[in-house]
Amino acid sequence: MSTRFFADTAVLLGRSMRHITRSLDTIVTTAITPVALMLLFVYVFGGALRKNTDNYVNYLLPGILLIAIASGIAYTAFRLFIDMKSGIFERFQSMPIQRSSVLWAHVMTSLFANGLSLAIIVLVAVAMGFRTSASPLAWLAVAGILALFTLALTWIAIIAGLSAKSVDGVSGFSYPFIFLPFISSAFVPTDTMPGPVRVFAENQPVTSIVNTIQDLFAQRPVGNDIWIALAWCSGTLVLAYVFAMTAYRRKIT
């Protein structure tokens, strides 16, 4: 990557971030739904759902953070889709800028916007009683896993933004990712689930990510879950990146 690539990406990132600051409702909206779910599950369902834990918000928070990321990447696909439909995408291609910078600016915007949403949710969780003995290194590991998960889903969102034919199509692709945490260890232990559901829950990526973050927050040994989580996120990221760049090249040729 050349110096020009970084300079062009920084300029386009500044453009996208200005759109975010002028429309903070995007961040607030992506944070409000997860916060509402957290309030619902802690104060309404928490008494019945909590098991093997005396602080349900501690147990619940990792899954809520993943739901927030899945909601946030829908806006990445939407912003890219709007750029294409408004003609600004073609205008960028006619300018002397690095072509891949257009996509990377959307990816970096997704990282920053989701990071702000997650910070808001963690602050609300602290107000609700979330407490952790996690060391700075454990917090760094949590941030790294969430960033890797965000990157993997963001490149899937790039594919959706490049391929969608309508606003409804580009907005709806994220629903399966939002739903996945509900069939995982995010809200209740998987051993409470019936056979086939339990098998799915224990072998889908969200469970290993949730288990890893829960262990890091509680300063427990993370075991194999961290390697499974990293493998899921890294594999998804590589595949999504390859397919996104292939779709992008088709668009600009």
Image (cartoon, grey):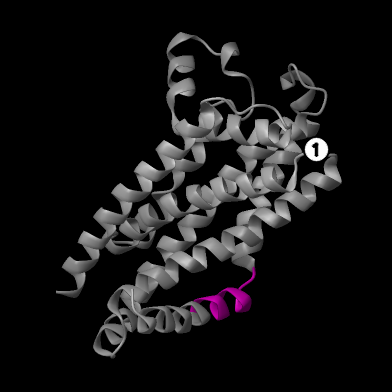
How many marks the image carries: the answer is 1
Q: Nearer the viewer, residue 185 or 101?
A: 101
**Which quadrant would the C terminus be assigned to in this image?**
bottom left
Q: Which residues are magenta?
A: 16-24
* Above or below for 101 versus 56: below
* Above or below for 156 versus 64: below
Q: Residue at x 34, y 83 (%)?
A: 88
Q: Nearer the viewer, residue 78 or 238?
A: 238
Q: Residue at x 77, y 29 (%)?
A: 56
Q: Residue at x 48, y 35 (%)?
A: 229
**Which quadrant would the N terminus be assigned to in this image?**
bottom left
What is the three-letter code of the residue carrying label 1? Ser
Q: Which residue is mark 1?
A: 133
Q: Position of residue 130 (x, y in %)?
A: 81, 39
Q: Position of residue 78 (x, y in %)?
A: 42, 64
Residue 176 shows in the view: no
Local crowd size for mark 1, using a 10 Å CA cut-off: few (<14), some (14–19), many (≥20): few
Q: Is residue 168 left or right of residue 35?
A: left
State the predominant SS element of the stretch in magenta: helix
Q: Position of residue 100 (x, y in %)?
A: 31, 73
Q: Is residue 22 magenta?
A: yes
Q: Residue at x 36, y 44 (%)?
A: 236
Q: Which quadrant would residue 219 be assigned to in this image? A: top right
Residue 127 shows in the view: yes
Q: Which quadrant would residue 125 be assigned to in this image? A: top right
